[in-house]
Amino acid sequence: MEADVRSVGSRDVLTARVLVIGGRDISTNRIVSILRRSGFDVVTCSEGIEGMMKLDESPCQVVILDEGLPNCRETCQQIREVFHVPVLLLGDHSDDGYWQRTESMEIDAHVPKTVSGRELIAWMRTILRRYADAD
């Protein structure tokens, strides 16, 4: 499924489907809210195995994975092995161990949990364009 990009006035409205695999914390809820307000079709779940099932049932154009989830690394690896979909890792970049834990993960972008709405949407557009150009 390709992202539907429509121009409305001076801004693009993206209606790509995004899977957010994350806890129910304030940061994740804020990310989901920003995406929905920006026109994305957002699917959520709180565990990696559930995320894999959702991807299998209904393809998504982007996965946002919370680095704080148990088995985050394994979930990311499984997504990469089975689905051709970009993965953005949502994490706490101020944590000293973050970069050590995530450097070997095959992700497309590191997104801080404190990301602004504007920056998050810019990341989404960039990733969607990059993958659309690769196909």
Image (tube, rainbow, N blue to C red):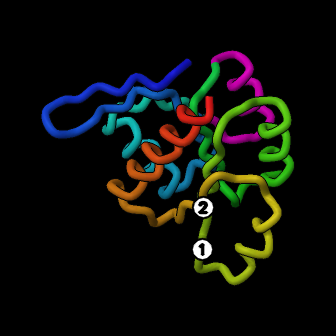
Which circle's residue, 1 or 2, is located before the other in the chain? 1
**Mark 2 burial class by Cα count in 10 Å: few <14, some 14-19, many 20+:** some
Which kind of residue does numbered mark 2 sit on? His
The residue that appears at 64% across and 41% down in the rendered structure is 86
Q: Where is residue 52 in the image (x, y as percent from the top left)?
A: 76, 30
**Mark 1 burial class by Cα count in 10 Å: few <14, some 14-19, many 20+:** some
Q: Position of residue 60 (x, y in %)?
A: 60, 27
The residue that appears at 65% across and 79% down in the rendered structure is 95
Q: Main secondary structure of the magenta part?
A: helix
Decide if residue 122 is on the left or right side of residue 106.
left
Are the two marked residues, 1 and 2, in contact with CB atoms closer than 8 angstroms?
A: yes
Outermost residue on the bottom side: it is: 96
Out of 17 and 84, give the one closest to the viewer. Answer: 84
Q: Position of residue 129 (x, y in %)?
A: 48, 39
Decide if residue 97 is on the left or right side of residue 132.
right
Q: Which mark is residue 93?
A: 1
Q: Which mark is residue 112?
A: none
User: How far apart are the two marked residues, 1 and 2, measured between alpha carbons?
Assistant: 8 Å
The residue that appears at 71% across and 73% down in the rendered structure is 98
Which quarter shows the C terminus?
top right
